[in-house]
Amino acid sequence: MNEPKMRVLVYEWQPKSRENIELALAESAELTFQGDPKSLQQAMVRQQFDLIFLRVRQEHNGSFKLLKKIHEQTPATPVIVTSEMERAELIVQALRAGAHDFLVDPLSPARLQLAVQKAMENRQMVNELAYLRRQQDIVYNFSQVIAESDNFKAILKSLRKFALTDASILLTGDTGTGKSFLSGSIHFNSPRRDHPFVKINCANIPETLLESELFGHEKGAFTGADKQRIGRFEQANHGTIFLDEIGEIPLEIQAKLLRVLEEKCFERVGGNRTIQVDVRLIAATNRNLPEQIAAGRFREDLFYRINVLEVHLPPLKERSRCLVPLARKLLHKAGASMRKRIDDFSPEALAMIQGYNWPGNIRQLANTIERAVILEDSPVITPTSLQIPELSRVTAPLIQTAEPLETHERELILKALEENLWVQKNAARCLGISPRVLNYKINKFNITHPNWRKNKR
């Protein structure tokens, strides 16, 4: 099937230029020629065009007013300005008024085709970027964050306010509590949202390379530095930089980081030229930084500089009302990623999720659900595919007791067996463990029942 031709509007009155445009584009485009501003604007009202050629006159004031009007009316449509004059101030004025390109007579077919190709590629890139930005807005929209527990609702309320400021933010909490995701939500709901968001995990980069990663290096700064490298702070200029696991940064690099935050400048490794940057910092750590300061592993002045606005994220076990809706959201995300339709969790699987304390927090929950989606063959996630660690789940409610742990585990198993008329398979499902594990524990605790086949023998 033939591809549809692009629609091109041409504001041109030079016969030779019109002829060259027709020669270059007639096969690939539907051409509409207009010779006066009124007809041009009427054509734009009647039809949407993919590209516009606009000739400017020597007395160019009226032409540039027309260019601005076109750009305001249809900002996504690239405009290629043509002229018989090659003057620098004319080209600059055209580009400032919204032109994509500026071509000077004579307009050769090859030059026209190349200009059109670049304009179409640029338009496609702009459209894709706009689409991705809209998708990013959806992903990082605060209203999409699961916040059913009162403590987490209060945190989101604070983050909405903090996002509108330019102050440094420190996110603390256990691993997997959502610090990285919420840093993105802060950036994409801030005044810096149209500028870069750069993330770096300080714990994943060797100490010898971390300074270069953050601040860049000059050619020859060290063995293997065969060319200049731009660091993450330069990449994040006018935007936001997220330093995850900031407590892992060595003391000597902490001093340089403090200077960047206070003076907004630094030098690349091996360089002496001062580089100015305007960056908003969001930092995160699962360490106790005051304890790190007391141990001499973290600078106190840096701590006060990054701790302007502190937000502590509670572990998942303290957000009990968030657990089920979060699990369902992660299920739908994993299913869509694998193109596998799974509608929900079985009641038994949901009971397992709610009964476990999730020491790895959201990250562990997401990984568990992703594995379950891979293993599951039915439309709902069952306990078999969920594979939650059995011992942690069974003993979690009993940790606060003073009696021996095995006593409570035996009582829990006996209770499940009684409630399921001593049918081991059903009791195992109720406990959220496999029948094999239940049989092992029955033998371990010497549990018997006269109706069991082995006891009848």
Image (cartoon, rainbow, N blue to C red):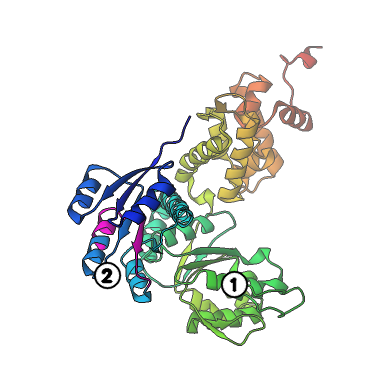
Give the residue type that dot 1 points to: Gly
Question: Could you say which is closer to the camera, residue 367 or residue 353?
Answer: 367
Question: Could you say which is closer to the camera, residue 296 or residue 306?
Answer: 306
- Read off the magenta span: 68-86
- Looking at marks 1 and 2 on the same chain, the residue that comes earlier in the sequence is marked by 2
Residue linked to disc 2: 58
Q: Say above or below: 234 vs 397.
A: below
Circle 1: element type = loop
Res. 77 in view: no
Q: Say above or below: 273 vs 397.
A: below
Give the numbered dot on residue 231. 1
The residue lying at 25 percent from left, 69 percent from top is 60
Find out whether residue 72 is within the magenta segment: yes
Question: Could you say which is closer to the camera, residue 32 or residue 355?
Answer: 32
* Residue reaching furthest to the left: 38
Q: Say above or below: 116 vs 170.
A: above
Res. 183 in view: yes
The residue lying at 35 percent from left, 70 percent from top is 85
Q: Quadrant of the C terminus?
A: top right
For residue 46, side relative to residue 162 (left or right): left
**Residue 335 at what x, y percent from top left?**
55, 35
For residue 428, side relative to residue 146 (left or right): right
Give the residue type that dot 2 points to: Gln
